[in-house]
Each structure stands twice: as structure tokens, then as C-alpha cells.
């Protein structure tokens, strides 16, 4: 009888050891997956810039990084503002896609930019949307209490038009630099313009 108990005990011990090893291995791979594939951290230590990019079915993290680098290469002022105001990019800040938009961006307070984009969106369109949303952060940063008085719809129209102009100016600047090899974007008008 004694030998049966010993062999059963050793089998249970082996089973527990294997189970613990498998749990540890699973936790290790989940950690690796989470750190390297779920969240991406854009870091530019030289400019003290750190932006967390959460995974999404609406964009590739690598495209967000490329868009940030396009902003950095083409407009240092907006890049510095981006680094100052934005700590994260996600797709939870935005609702669904709006008809007619290739890239939809949202800046709903806090320090996050929401991005949703169609598959045919270019990196320049994505970068110009980032500039547009950073413009809204700049508006909020420079806003005084009296700016909130008066017609809210009129204020929103003016705010959007200002940021569409900034985003479109950036887009045109980048498109003209890159030459004919870039897909031409359709005209992107503010929903507040009369055209």
C-alpha cells in the first residue's frame, strides 16, 4: 500500500508542477502579447514626447506612428503641440464613421485623440487629421471664459472651420512636397461650409 500512495502522490505533484508551468507560460505569453502587440508607445525622448497608441480595428498602430512622424517632419510647431497636449490615441473617443469622411478624428477633452479611418486613407490624410485634432486642443488651451458665451453653434462652426483650415493647409503642404507618387485626396470640406 505504501508504494501506491507514493506513486499517486508523485503523479499529483507532477500534474501540479505541469499545471503551474503552463499557467506561468500562458501568463508570460499574454504579457508579451499585451506589451508588444496590444499597446504601442510612441517615444521621442529628444523632444520629451510619449503617446500611447491603443489597438483598434480602425487603424494599424504603425500607421499612427507614421502619421506622427509625418507631422514631426513637416511642422515642428504642431508636433510640439501634439507632444504637449496628447498622451493617447484610441478609437473609443469617436462614434461611427461619418459618410464622406476618409479619416474621422475626435478630441473630446482630456488628452486623447480618437481616430477612425477607412482602409483607403493615405498617411497624409491621417496626419492632417491629427493636426486638425491638435488644433482643437490648442483652441481649448487658449480659450478664455468669455469665449463660451454667445451662440454655441456659431462658436462650434468657427472652431471647426479654423481646424479644417489648419488640417487642410498641412495636407496640401505635405502633398506638394511628396510629388506625384501620392494618391490625390478628394476635397475635404468642413460640414459647416456652404459649398
Image (cartoon, rainbow, N blue to C red):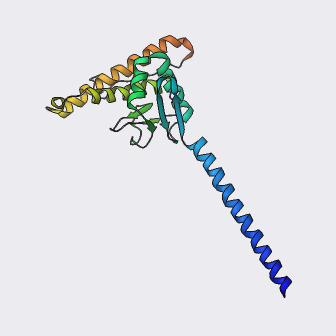
Left or right of residue 84, residue 64 in this image: right
Instruction: Report if residue 129 is visible in the image.
Output: no
Compare residues 5 and 23 and report the one nearer the observer.
Answer: 5
Q: Residue at x 54, y 37 (%)?
A: 40
Residue 111 lies, in percent from the top left, at 37, 36
Which quadrant holds residue 188? Answer: top left
Screen quadrant of the N terminus: bottom right
**Between residues 115 and 96, which one lies in front from this camera angle?**
115
Q: Where in the figure is residue 36, as x and y percent of width and height? A: 60, 41
Residue at 47%, 21% in the rendered image: 71
What percent of the width, then of the height, locates residue 178? 53, 13
187 displayed left or right of 149:
right
Q: Nearer the viewer, residue 166 or 84?
A: 84
Q: Give the quadrant of residue 35.
A: top right
Height in image: 5 above or below 34? below
Q: Residue at x 29, y 29 (%)?
A: 141
Q: Is residue 28 above or below residue 155?
A: below
Question: Toward the viewer: 17 or 192?
Answer: 17
In the depicted structure, whether residue 35 falls above or below residue 102 = below
Q: Position of residue 68 (x, y in %)?
A: 49, 26
Left or right for 2, reference 153:
right
Amino acid at each position: 500500500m505504501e508504494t501506491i500512495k507514493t506513486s499517486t502522490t508523485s503523479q499529483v505533484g507532477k500534474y501540479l508542477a505541469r499545471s503551474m508551468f503552463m499557467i506561468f507560460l500562458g501568463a508570460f505569453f499574454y504579457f508579451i502579447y499585451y506589451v508588444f502587440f496590444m499597446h504601442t508607445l510612441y517615444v521621442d525622448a529628444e523632444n520629451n514626447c510619449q503617446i500611447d497608441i491603443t489597438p483598434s480595428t480602425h487603424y494599424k498602430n504603425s500607421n499612427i506612428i507614421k502619421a506622427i512622424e509625418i507631422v514631426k517632419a513637416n511642422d515642428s510647431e504642431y508636433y510640439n503641440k501634439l507632444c504637449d497636449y496628447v498622451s493617447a490615441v484610441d478609437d473609443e473617443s469617436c462614434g461611427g464613421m461619418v459618410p464622406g469622411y476618409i479619416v474621422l478624428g475626435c478630441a473630446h477633452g482630456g488628452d486623447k485623440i480618437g481616430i477612425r479611418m477607412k482602409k483607403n486613407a493615405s498617411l497624409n490624410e491621417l496626419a492632417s487629421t491629427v493636426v486638425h485634432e491638435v488644433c482643437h486642443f490648442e483652441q481649448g488651451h487658449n480659450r478664455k471664459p468669455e469665449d463660451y458665451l454667445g451662440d454655441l453653434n456659431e462658436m462650434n462652426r468657427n472652431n471647426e472651420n479654423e481646424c479644417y483650415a489648419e488640417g487642410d493647409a498641412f495636407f496640401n503642404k505635405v502633398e506638394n512636397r511628396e510629388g506625384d507618387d501620392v494618391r490625390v485626396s478628394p476635397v475635404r470640406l468642413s460640414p459647416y461650409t456652404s459649398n
